[in-house]
Image (spheres, rainbow, N blue to C red):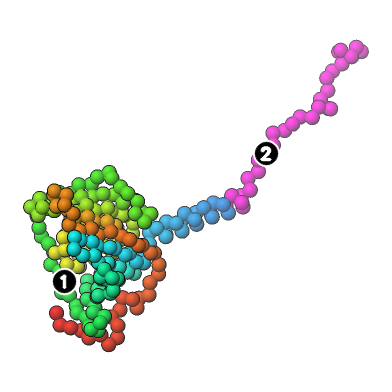
Amino acid sequence: MNNLFKPFYFSNVKIRKKPKHKINVRKFMFSYLITLLTFAGSFSATSQPFEGSLKFLQSTVTDTSYYTYYVKDNLVRIDELNKNLKLERYSLINIQNKEVSIVDPFRKMYLKLPPQKKNHEKEKDYQIIKTENYKIIKGYTCYQWRVRNETKNTEICFWIAKDNFNFFDELISLLDNNLRINDYFMHIPANNGIIPFESVERTLLREMKSKLELIDLNKSSLSKSLFEIPKGFVLKEY
């Protein structure tokens, strides 16, 4: 038979089969588990209340002072230092029990403050302005809030950081709310979890009165002994 009419056989033709992609189930599950644990750990870390210290510098036209906040759970200690960084006194606050003690480390005595009365000034006296302005302070994005009161000829500009600073709004409600900065801050809505890293008080004509700014932030585990009144200190009647 003529070779042109011979049937064509495929016995010598190699047909390439589409490779099958096998899924390594064990490897896949391991990677998934690692990703899940990483996400969960990250979420857990960011959801923890702040613990550590925050150091502020306060400056006025005539004076300079420093305040260091130590925070652990519902306990807060505030050290007050003069311009020479010499400790003058400190406050111990138990937010849960609503207790405030002022400690004099040199006279080795302390006093307990009575609960502070809430300030009932009218909301209409205050104008609250949230701007889109922001700046980075100690790695935090801080947005600008302005609170002004025309009858008092005062405006305070707050640069607000938001994180798990849940202690702060409860703290200032226990402290002297005759302090203008505390009073004005409490008019900012939904202030749970936020803290001003910088506060600038001015007249309505922009003349600066005072400035409070964060100069150091340290997240660390603190000993509870830091929040206890030292042994031998005498209670003084208020």
Res. 198 in view: yes
Dominant SS of magenta comes to: loop
- Residue 189 seen anywhere in this rendered image of the structure: no
Q: Nearer the viewer, residue 25 or 189?
A: 189
Q: Residue at x 38, y 59 (%)?
A: 47
Residue positioned 17% across, 67% down in the render: 176
- Is 26 magenta? The answer is yes
Q: Residues within 10 Å of mark 2 (few under 14, many from 20)?
A: few
Nearest the viewer among 24 and 201 is 201
Query: Label 1 is placed on what type of residue?
Result: Pro
Q: Is 136 drawn above or below residue 227 in the view shown?
A: above
Task: Farthest residue to the bottom: give it.
Answer: 232
Residue 120's spot in the image, x, y percent?
10, 60
Report the disc number at residue 22.
none
Frontmost residue, 47 versus 195: 195
Q: Which residue is mark 1?
A: 115
What range is drawn magenta here?
Answer: 1-29
Marks 2,1: beta carbons within 8 A? no
Give left or right: position of 118 versus 2.
left
Residue at 9 percent of width and 54 percent of height:
152
Residue closest to the eye, 180 or 48: 180
- Foreground mark, 2 or 1? 1
Q: Residue furthest right?
A: 1
Which quadrant holds residue 3? top right
Q: Is residue 24 magenta?
A: yes
Instruction: Name the secondary structure under disc 1.
Output: loop
Q: Which residue is mark 2?
A: 20
Q: Position of residue 102 (x, y in %)?
A: 22, 76
Rendered location of residue 188, percent (x, y): 20, 53
